[in-house]
Amino acid sequence: MTEGNGEDEVVISGISCRLPGCDNILEFKEKLFAGVDLVTTENQRFDTEFYGIPRFGQLNDVSRFDASFFNIRPAQADKMDPALRMLLEVTYEAVVDSGCSMESLKGSRTGVFVGSCPSAAHTAWTKQADEISGFEMTGCHSSMLSNEVSHTFGLQEPSITLSTACSSSLVAIDSAVRSIRSNQCDSAIVAAAKIILNPLESLQYLKLGMLSPNGRCLSFDEKADGYCRSEGVVAILLQRKGYAQRNYATVLGSKVMNNGQPDKAILSPSKERLVHLIRDVYKEVNINVSEIAYVEAHGTGTQAGDKAEIDAICDVLCEGRSGQLVVGSVKSNIGHTEEVSGLVGVLKVVLAMEGNVLPGNIHFTNLNKKIEGLVNGKIQVVKDNTPWKGGLVGINSFGFGGTNAHVILHKDRRVSQNMTGVSPNMLHNKRLLITNGRTENGVRESLTLLNNYNYEQFCSATLFGRKSNYRAMAIGPNLDSIEVKPVKSRKNDVWLIFTGMGCQWNGMGKQLVSIDMVFESLKTSDEILKKEGFSLIETLTDENTAIDTPTKSFVCILAIQIALYSLIRDLGIEVSGYIGHSVGELACAYADGCLTHEQALLAAFFRGQCIENTCIPKGAMAAIGLSVEETLSICPDGVTVACHNASDSVTVSGKKSTVQEFVGDMKSKNIFAKEVDCSGIAFHSTLISGVKHAFMEMLIKIIPEPKRVSGKWITTSVPCNERPEILSCSPTFLVDNLLNPVLFYEAVATIPDDALVVEVAPHALLQSLLKRSLKNKNYVFGFMKKDCLKNEENILRTIGSWCYISRLEGICQLRRKIHLGYCSGPKKCFI
């Protein structure tokens, strides 16, 4: 099989497992690196002494299954092989781990390839004719291991069960990769399951001389006397690199061969045929064998098998090698999971690649002196956990009928190996944790589990989707309060409100640098404005720097709005509409794609500069608690309604002395009136018309090609009934935004009921206006508050509240994927 290139490479993007003493990949990782013997004599499923068989590696619990989660009838689930039940579970988890959802794979070009051996459950459940229901066949037939996965999750590409004994799962990987490379499918689930239910099956292996009487795999040791049987269920997701959201490792090549030597016993391993297999696979993918840094061997602990395998590996992979080749076998740690063993080897290699440490083989004391490759020192067994610099890995697997397989994996070293998911720019005092699941207790436990690990600030535990009844949200790391709600049947629209002047305050960006994605946007803004001689981050974070001019106010407010919107966008939250109040429309223009980051900031900067550099009369603005009609009827000459904020609230603008007299008059009549901070500029009045020409000239330079406004942007600069069919974010439009009245109340009236309405600003100035105008028919939030010392937490909690209240389909596209406490590799995450 030739190696793929670029986006066509096949990568492992998702993993999940159940192994002896381990209910998930995290437990397996911890016990593997701790050197724990996962084969114990505790709570064995049947009396091994009675049957005269050795101990075996046993899963914690094979009895439980949530049939309704998978839409499986109780009668069918009752007669379903436990191996198939658990296969469905780990398959679902592996897809979640990849950053995909099962719903997104439904109907996609995804194949299913499952390694299998005969079902012991089928034999047990068909002994009594009068108890047979028929579901024994659909629940236990080997073909159903793959077909039930395809059926349950709506996958319509190749669905194949392969049975080559102990090499089954590695053969399944080979088949899956070939199917992807031949364009039969774009993704493939590869899985296998082994549950030991029949003690007499173990007795047969013992009679054949294959099992260790002591119930352990002494891989490569001089006392090796057979293998220990073990249980396991493993699933991985293979995808084209271009489709994958995570990349654990790339499959560079694979090959399958059979011994096919009628002059030897069928159970006899063949060094010659294994040499042929290994030599061929590296030749096909054009890899120099000296590039192989580690081999995860089959290594069952049988004298004949270990010798044939290591001597074959030595003959091929040590040719021309300057140093030792290191090998190991996970079977020493957990026993031999037979048809699952190839996938367990893959899991071990993935964990080694992620942690840059090769786990040590246990039960290895003295090397087997019959194995030439060990005696001559060309091959070394990894006895203890060993630091590893990476490289190519070969994985070997034998089938007792003679079918052997070899797979080559490679870890892209350009991918960050930061297992905690911590970015160097981040302060991890606070982080948002969200999870969902079937039960209230389940989501609470998931939050607690997530909180034990130092992950990024936006973390999810499981997919939002299939049969999730509850969603929980909390702010870590202290988890002072965990909020749990039932999942809603539909998602709410999200509307953003970008506030204008008056929401600025000194030091308003100080806490934002602790949110990595927000800080990245602010750094970009800072670089843009430095060309104009303006230091944004210094201005935002220094509490002693007054934001007291139009230029400072405009650019600081807009930079924070762009940063907060970028966070929303990067989290994958779909926005239904946005409304800007006055200069807040520049943020709308950025969100709508009408202005680039640079264009929006420069428009704000020169809006301020033109005002400051133009000789205009001293002005003032004031909030008045009256309707537009009432205000117009009593406004003195020189004062005009600049902003229609609510049915009973307007902002007036005009000459400073006249406005101040008007405010005093209103207060004397017990009418609400309050002068607002506008830096002495009477915005949205004729007093600043002198700015028009200079501002227009600058905008023409900044925006040479205006773009069309989308239907999401409800502008407050143009009355709804006067809005042209095609509205462009042109220089003329942005000048009108500065001079025309702000029709905020009319725009807010277009927000549908039950929407999530979020004020995006350094201070949530418009909350009371929004709540009055929307009449409690919507959820209203604000990101930040003036002089608040917990704005970082406010931002996290606001985003969490959206996903907590509403059936939002994401927080997605995160830097790390979190799944039930295990984090690794880049890129996306779904809730």
Image (cartoon, rainbow, N blue to C red):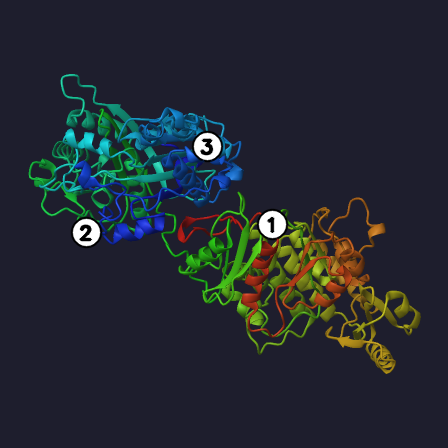
**Given the current orientation, which residue lies at the most extreme front position?**
130
Residue 421 left/right relative to 310: right
Q: Position of residue 163 (x, y in %)?
A: 31, 26
Q: Residues within 10 Å of mark 1 (few under 14, many from 20)?
A: some
Given residues 762 and 593, the one toward you in this image is 762
Upstream in the sequence, badge 3 or badge 1? 3
Q: Cα distance, mark 2 to mark 1?
A: 48 Å
Residue 162 left/right relative to 764: left
Type of amino acid under label 2: Asp
Residue 704 left/right relative to 64: right
> How many tags in the picture?
3
Report helix, strand or loop for mark 2: loop
Q: Residues within 10 Å of mark 2 (few under 14, many from 20)?
A: some
Given residues 305 and 351, the one toward you in this image is 305
Whether 513 is drawn above or below 101: the answer is: below
Given residues 78 and 322, the one toward you in this image is 78
Q: Position of residue 131 (x, y in %)?
A: 40, 28
Type of amino acid under label 3: Gln
**Given the current orientation, which residue lies at the most extreme top position?**
262
Q: Which residue is mark 3?
A: 76
Whether 762 is drawn above or below 749: the answer is: below
Q: Which residue is mark 2?
A: 384
- Which circle, 3 or 1, is nearer the viewer? 3
Q: Which residue is mark 1?
A: 807
Q: Residues within 10 Å of mark 3 (few under 14, many from 20)?
A: some
The answer to whether mark 3 and mark 2 are in CB contact below 8 A is: no
Does the rendering let one see residue 358? yes
Q: Cα distance, mark 3 to mark 1?
A: 31 Å
